[in-house]
Image (tube, coloured by chain):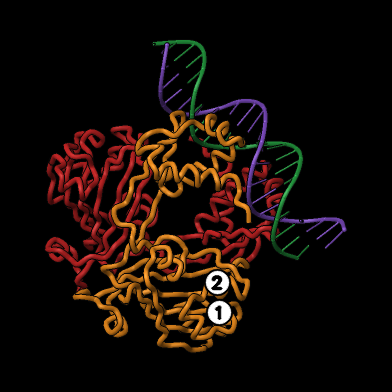
Chain colours: A red, B orange, C green, D purple
Amino acid sequence: MTKTKYIKIYEDLKKKIEQNVFPYQELLPSENTLLKEYGCSRNTVRRAIAELASKGYVQTKHGQGVRVIYQELKQKEYMFGDVETFKEFSMRHNNKQRTEVFRFQEWTVDESLHKITSFPVGTDIYYLQRVRYLDDKPLIIDHNYFRKDVVQDLTVEITEDSVYEYMEKELNESIVTTKRKMTVEKMDDLDERYLQLNGYNCVAVVTSYTYNADGVMFEYTQSRHKPDYFVFYDQAQRRK
Amino acid sequence: MTKTKYIKIYEDLKKKIEQNVFPYQELLPSENTLLKEYGCSRNTVRRAIAELASKGYVQTKHGQGVRVIYQELKQKEYMFGDVETFKEFSMRHNNKQRTEVFRFQEWTVDESLHKITSFPVGTDIYYLQRVRYLDDKPLIIDHNYFRKDVVQDLTVEITEDSVYEYMEKELNESIVTTKRKMTVEKMDDLDERYLQLNGYNCVAVVTSYTYNADGVMFEYTQSRHKPDYFVFYDQAQRRK
DNA sequence: TGGTATTTGTCCGTATGTATC
DNA sequence: GGATACATACGGACAAATACC
């Protein structure tokens, strides 16, 4: 479990940017300087820098240098950006977290369910409805659909804790890629009953399709967020 | 303006995946096979594959291969993912597009405006309010703040067309990085008046901070979207 | 079960091109 | 024009995970 060189360099540079060793809008030391400092090849430095750029920390300019564009955010709380479990998220922020499972069923995918989840017709699945509380506030209603052949022997106890943790630690399954879609929908009865919507008549909906290491889509989930606590961050480069 | 080798390979593989030459859940030919086919080095093939992976087309697995996880989406319309102008977006989808500018002002940033935009106090800016129509439906209300020293000599005519096009073609300025934040907010008077909200009492809000090639943040924008037409796509890898 | 081949991951060094200063 | 800096591309070496026999 030793970290790779370019990840260590990436993390070191990231830390120095966050600590203002390399201030906002200044240039980083040149690649040639850095490779001497870190005692590595040019490629390795460049990989670290590419990682920083993809996360919105720096911006490179041909012939000029690498400019820091990181600015401290005022509001880092409730940031759902990475592929991260609800449990990991709440622990990272020292929040108290609780999950209430109020539906746990086993289904077989039919034509209409196939249209929604894109699981093949005939697939055996678990269907869950869960409410996620952060510091005793109900924030999210999850509608989870898991393939039974991948996420085996699920129990209510597991789903009250963390399904991903169970998959990774017990089943030795790995979660790799998630494709997400964000939309806004009118609230339904469940949203109204469980989330405290304070006057909002809609919710933020994150629909996700998740793949394991074998390329099997094992999860379809619709997460319905309390709108006044939902934030999603993103960072993009303009293609030329 | 010749394309680089790895981009050409990326686009070729992408096309073949979309056309089912390499079907869903199958493995791509190995890197060694591909580098012979394309007559290039291993690094170049790997860069193309990394590009595909970052866009959610494939997923690599150590020792096994590169698996296709691309699936045709049902609904590609109204997909706001890349850094793209409203004009580019509508042209790419053959939609009729129109922008109505109903406020055009020149301001100097004070303390309270600094808190919102994070422009330095004293910066001279343009402030615009615009409604964006797609096929005669009002979809978005934009509140744009542009630095006057970067986006020079803005006119109403330009803002009715495309500010980015003006910057790139006339000012020879380049747009590079955008940091975005998505939230849901209660509608305000403008939203209610201009967007047809059909019963929704809130809008999807995209707040963006945009940088030019010199690393100067020249734009702060709040785009307030009609909720039933708003979709945002995203793709993420779980970090180990 | 075990050994070998295959495949991807990391890292290095070098050469050349191109944009900026 | 020359120096500096990033961008692309090549080729090679070794490690690690997987597949196969």
The answer for which chain carries disc 2 is B
Q: Residue flagged by tag 1: what amino acid is it?
A: Arg
| Residue at the disc numbered 1 | B147
Q: Is residue B110 above or below residue A173?
A: below
| Residue at the disc numbered 2 | B217
Q: Are marks 2 and 1 in contact (CB under 8 Å)?
A: yes
Q: Residue at x 22, y 47 (%)?
A: A117
A172 or C5, which is in the foreground? Answer: C5
Q: Quadrant of residue A141 in the image?
A: bottom left
B195 or A190, which is in the foreground? Answer: B195
What element does badge 1 sit on? strand
What element does badge 2 sit on? strand
The answer to whether one can see residue B150 in this image is yes
Q: Residue flagged by tag 2: what amino acid is it?
A: Met
Residue B240 shown left or right of residue B73 in the figure: right
The answer for which chain carries disc 1 is B
Q: How many marks?
A: 2
Q: Residues within 10 Å of mark 2 (few under 14, many from 20)?
A: many
A64 or B53, which is in the foreground? Answer: B53
- Precedes in sequence: disc 2 or disc 1: 1
